[in-house]
């Protein structure tokens, strides 16, 4: 008879301990450690076979993976060219962000290609899914719906139906009877995801699973899920806004940090094929405190508006706030402007906003943020046809950034007439037509060039 033992597992990060704790030592969360009963099964001895023998690298043939287009070019771009047969993909995001809508839209295109799809929902009835499908004009005959949470029953249906694609919505509602913990626990998520991985790899079925996110924006049980699956996609954006961002943070079949931009409408998600123009559509002209920069997301250049508001403070300590950019980075840039450019910002509040709901982590935004702060401080608008990018060091120097040619070409394509960048990037961009490029070496030269 199998022996059982008790352990305590953090439902947020997966940390395990032999006794209950109020605070998780792994992630610092309170009240997330729960008791789970583990049944130990005695394993049988495994004989040596040819499948356990190592192979020489030269003896292994690497074939190009087969991909299927989803019908949404933005999604195909994030995936690296389409869905890979036999892959396991995780789609995460806040409730109501559009995960189920996106997957239903994929079903229509896959069904038109003659692919059989099994949509398994643990949260909605088939009638509810049918109502959403009618609203989205999803009418393919190749799509079958199943409302079930028992993984054993789901696997039985997969064996009988033999679908090409399986969608699980969501993984937190699925459970295995062999695991005694509650659905949504770390043990259940690990076991059910492993079972789905075996189904995907063993039978060549493409499996897409939906994952809930925690309050800090990460997928519940991130250490468990993200290490198992092949691809991790995050759906980002404000539910009250119309735009949605789909970001790849892990992709075994393509590049990471690619993004796709969608707009939520009554007919479902629509692609934004020109995100730069979309992000700048409502940009105010001849207003101080705004600058345009070009960031690189994956392999795509995006023109983004950076806004700043500098106002005299009524507090002893001035306030510093940033949206879409690292707060500590903004604090450093303000200190550099005070020390190297002579801006007396110690008595002023400073607020920074990256418009369009974007969150940028690359340092190429430094020059645009510094320019926007100086523009608001002096109440002097930056010319509307100017693009600014470059990394700023602690001594005030502008350092080179990667893929400067792509950034300048994107700015010229959208009609900008001038680009200010680090002088070390100047030689590689002189041949781009339709735009004037200016190289600067430090913060003082940057402010002189734009103000």
Image: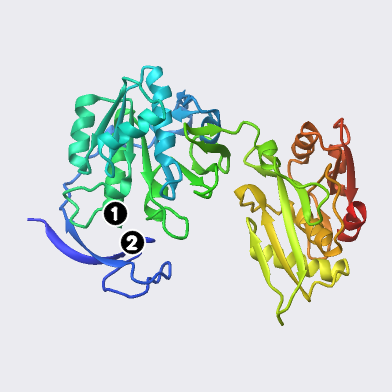
Q: How crowded is mark 2: few (under 14 residues within 10 Å), some or many (20 or more)?
A: many
Is residue 34 found left or right of 275 in the rendered image?
left
Is residue 57 found left or right of 133 in the rendered image?
right
CA gap between label 2 and label 1 equals 8 Å
Q: Residue 11 carries which label?
A: 2
- Viewer-side residue, 83 vs 230: 83
Q: Residue at x 80, y 71 (%)?
A: 345
Residue 142 percent location from the top left of the image = 32, 21
Q: Which residue is drawn at 44% across and 50% down?
A: 94
Q: Do the residues labelled 2 and 1 touch (CB within 8 Å)?
A: yes
Q: Which residue is drawn at 23% across and 48% down?
A: 175
Q: How is the image coloured?
A: rainbow
Residue 241 percent location from the top left of the image = 55, 47
Q: Residue at x 87, y 30 (%)?
A: 433
The quadrant of the image that shows the N terminus is: bottom left
Residue 111 vs 194, above or below: the answer is above
Residue 240 vs 70, above or below: the answer is below
Q: Tell me how many marks there are.
A: 2
The quadrant of the image that shows the C terminus is: bottom right
- Residue 201 shows in this picture: no
Q: Mark 1 points at which residue?
A: 184
> Image quarter for residue 53?
top left
Q: N-terminal of the two: label 2 or label 1?
A: 2
Residue 432 percent location from the top left of the image = 85, 32
> Image quarter for residue 36?
bottom left
Residue 92 vs 68, above or below: the answer is below
Residue 388 percent location from the top left of the image = 80, 48
Determine the secondary structure under disc 2: loop
The single residue placed furthest to the bottom in the displayed view is 316
- Viewer-side residue, 262 vs 183: 262
Is residue 411 found left or right of 40 in the rendered image?
right
């Amino acid at each position: 008879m199998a022996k059982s033992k008790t352990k305590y597992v953090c439902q947020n990060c997966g940390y395990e301990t032999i006794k209950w704790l109020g605070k998780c030592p792994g992630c610092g969360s309170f009240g997330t450690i729960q008791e789970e009963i583990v049944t130990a099964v005695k394993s049988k001895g495994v004989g040596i076979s040819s499948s356990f023998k190592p192979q020489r690298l030269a003896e292994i043939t690497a074939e190009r993976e087969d991909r299927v287009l989803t019908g949404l070019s933005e999604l195909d771009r994030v995936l690296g060219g389409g869905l890979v047969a036999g892959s396991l993909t995780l789609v995460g995001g806040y409730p109501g962000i559009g995960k189920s809508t996106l997957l239903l839209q994929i079903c229509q295109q896959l069904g038109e290609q003659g692919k059989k799809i099994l949509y398994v929902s643990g949260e909605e009835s088939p009638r509810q899914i049918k109502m959403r499908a009618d609203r989205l004009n999803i009418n393919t005959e190749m799509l079958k719906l199943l409302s079930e949470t028992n993984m054993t029953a789901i696997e039985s249906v997969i064996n009988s139906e033999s679908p090409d694609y399986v969608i699980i919505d969501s993984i937190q509602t699925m459970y295995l009877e062999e695991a005694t913990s509650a659905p949504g626990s770390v043990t259940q998520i690990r076991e059910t995801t492993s079972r789905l991985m075996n189904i995907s790899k063993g039978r060549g079925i493409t499996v897409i699973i939906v994952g809930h996110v925690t309050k800090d924006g990460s997928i519940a049980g991130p250490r468990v899920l993200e290490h198992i699956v092949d691809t991790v996609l995050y759906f980002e954006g404000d539910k009250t806004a119309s735009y949605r961002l789909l970001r790849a943070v892990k992709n075994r079949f393509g590049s990471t940090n690619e993004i796709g931009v969608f707009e939520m409408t009554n007919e479902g998600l629509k692609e934004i094929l020109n995100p730069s123009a979309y992000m700048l559509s409502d940009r105010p002209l001849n207003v101080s405190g705004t600058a345009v920069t070009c960031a690189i997301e994956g392999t795509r250049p995006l023109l983004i508006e950076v806004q700043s508001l500098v106002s005299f403070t009524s507090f002893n300590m001035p306030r510093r706030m940033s949206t879409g950019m690292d707060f500590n980075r903004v604090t450093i840039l303000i200190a550099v402007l005070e020390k190297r450019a002579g801006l007396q910002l110690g008595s002023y509040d400073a607020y920074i906003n990256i418009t369009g709901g974007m969150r940028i982590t690359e340092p190429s935004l430094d020059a645009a943020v510094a320019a926007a702060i100086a523009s608001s401080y002096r109440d002097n608008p930056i010319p509307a046809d100017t693009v600014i990018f470059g990394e700023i060091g602690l001594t005030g120097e502008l350092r080179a950034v990667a893929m400067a040619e792509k950034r300048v070409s994107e700015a010229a394509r959208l009609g900008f007439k001038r680009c200010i960048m680090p002088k070390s990037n100047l030689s590689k961009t002189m041949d781009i037509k339709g735009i004037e490029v200016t190289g600067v070496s430090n913060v003082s030269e940057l402010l002189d060039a734009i103000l």
